[in-house]
Image (spheres, rainbow, N blue to C red):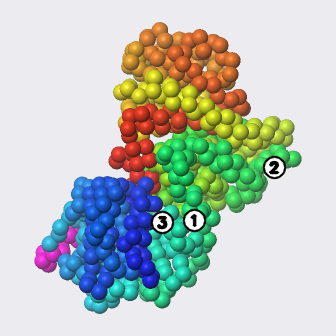
Amino acid sequence: MCGIVGYIGPRQAAGLLLEGLRRMEYRGYDSSGIAVVNGNGLKVRKAAGKLSVLEQELQDDMPSGTIGIGHTRWATHGAPTTPNAHPHTDQSGRIAVIHNGIIENSGSVRRALELRGHTFKSETDTEVLAHLVGEFYQGNLEEAVAMALREVEGAYGLAFISADEPGVLVAARKGSPLLVGVGEQEWFVASDASPLLQHTRSVVYMDDGEMAVLTREGYRIRNLETTRISKPVNQIDWDLAMVERNGHPHFMFKEICEQPESLHNTLRGHLLEDEGTARVSGLNLSDEELKQFERIIITACGTSWHSALIGEYMLEEMARIPVEVEYASEFRYRNPVVDQRTLVIGISQSGETADTLAAIREAKRRGARTVGLVNVVGSTIAREVDGGIYLHAGPEVGVASTKAFTSQVAALALITLRIARLRNLSILQGRQFIQALRLLPDKVAGILERAGEVEQLAERFLRNSTNALYLGRGVNFPVALEGALKLKEISYIHAEGYPAAEMKHGPIALIDENMPVVFIAPRDAVHSKIVSNIEEVKARGGKVIALINEGDKEIERLADATLTIPDTLDLLTPIVTSIPLQLLSYYVAVARGCNVDQPRNLAKSVTVE
Ligand code: M6R
């Protein structure tokens, strides 16, 4: 949700900023811009559309200067036009800002500024901020920014530069992620680590209410008053290759293919064969503490919410503890029953999703113990929860979440195992579960080897469809939801996920010979029921594509096409059934010529409410 990057050091800034924006384009991609300061003042260049439009415009006209800021936008206030693109400048045109977030009182501040003679070029909340800083400016950018931020309400990760102070970059954070990159006599700010990896792995994670002042001599962190804050420098363990496509046609495809390894990494170090349990020491909860919880709430958004639903099935089935799954955006605005005996698990790939973060804060406020399942190390959710599990799935760049989903399910399996062993699961059952978990990476690799079969199905059944239905039962109902979400978000085909038996309470009316229906039908406890549901679809002329286990003659006979998935424990089937559905949506989107990694209207990290 908007990516920001800033640089100060000995090198030319413009190229570094563009390269940084390229690596952060997944955060927003409807317009972009940069500003640099040189001996002739402030140079601002921006363009509507993808970053490539700006790059094209700058090809023969790269502004020089060794300090600068850059922005890639996901529009909130104002359409994705060039005037609304960042950076925005103040009334004098000598101060520029980039911003990720929303200034909530921008309307009233703007009206007050207009009464004092300010004129605005854009419809954005951010330009108001630039003008406010300009009004406070008396030769000290740092102080002007601090004064302006005391006047505004809302969320921001931002960076300012001024033509009058070519040696100072001022950044601030409240509610939107921001980190400082510490290089060799050069310093960066960025929304996430991806634009920094090429230059440094040393970062300082900023917290809400903090400002960073970067000069040519170094950096310091302070609050909005003047108090200096001492912060640790952290080392990022991701490397550059991990955020590059490495020969794959798309990030999404690369990330789908990485799942044997990402699953292995999620499980690594947690499985305790002898005890038949999982270590998950990062939860920071003793056995005694874990036993005392009376219920669990899992909260998340989007794909992470789907993995939460799978977690509900696992925890209730194996640990016999009541679980509720809440959309994070809903949880925070109702009056949930949460207290010290409630364990609240927040799931987030990015660790920055605003609604999930707010839900976790609300749970903490109500006295619950919070745990995070997060992929991005050092992200806000990871730092705010009481404990958690890092997914270690590696960077996920494609906007459609894939490997993070299977790693989330694996992490939920680890938590389930630990809690279940403390409640009612025998050591033998625990060991069997571990054995099944250990086999998953190889089983997933086996499915990926047969990606070509999925490509053919995509071409034959879905490429030219306008609608699709995904049906599953039990723990594979959330997989149906996830399969439908994957298809709609990257190929723009309308798709619905349903519990298979619910179909006859409404969606069955949609079925005709043009409706592809994807059934997730492993040979599990509800297999015979799903066979009946397939019969119902066939009786109405629907086209059935079924995910089945090897040798399932019954469904083979009924379905128009089948894809075989390997056997595993019923509760772990989502990890193997979700992979063909990821591939299916990918191949459909490619065949339809869609932008797989940057689908329209979306952004990877949703840092606004
Ligand atoms: O980073 P998070 O896991 O918190 O993100 C949650 C959703 O925004 C995300 O899963 C979204 O639904 C993806 N586009 C799905 O592919």
Q: For the point 26% across and 57% down, which residue is it? A: 48
In the image, residue 509 sits, relative to residue 53, either above or below, namely above
Which secondary structure class fits the magenta region best? helix
Counting other residues with Cα less than 10 Å from the Cα at mark 1, is it few (<14), some (14-19), or many (20 or more)?
many
The residue lying toward the viewer, choosing from 573 and 551, is 551
Q: Position of residue 559 (x, y in %)?
A: 54, 15
Q: Position of residue 478 (x, y in %)?
A: 54, 34
Residue that numbered label 1 is attached to: 378
- SS of the residue under disc 2: strand
Q: Is residue 535 magenta?
A: no
Q: Which amino acid does label 2 sit on?
A: Leu
Mark 2 and mark 3 lie on one chain; the one further toward the N terminus is 3
Q: Does the residue labelled 1 lie within 8 Å of ligand 1?
A: no
In the image, residue 206 sits, relative to residue 122, either above or below, namely below
Q: For the point 82% across and 40% down, which residue is it? A: 431
Q: Which amino acid does label 1 sit on?
A: Gly
Q: For the point 69% across and 41% down, which residue is it? A: 441
| Mark 1 vs mark 2, CA separation in Å | 27 Å
On screen, residue 296 versus residue 38, left or right, reads right
Q: What residue type is labelled 3?
A: Pro
Residue that numbered label 3 is attached to: 195
In the image, residue 429 sits, relative to residue 267, either above or below, namely above
- SS of the residue under disc 3: loop
In the image, residue 327 sits, relative to residue 432, either above or below, namely below
Q: Do the residues labelled 1 and 3 touch (CB within 8 Å)?
A: no
Q: Where is residue 136 in the image (x, y as percent from the top left)?
A: 26, 84
The residue lying toward the viewer, choosing from 253 and 1, is 253
Residue that numbered label 2 is attached to: 272
Q: Report the span colored magenta.
A: 108-118
| Mark 2 vs mark 3, CA separation in Å | 37 Å
Counting other residues with Cα less than 10 Å from the Cα at mark 2, is it few (<14), some (14-19), or many (20 or more)?
some
| Residue 358 seen by the camera | no
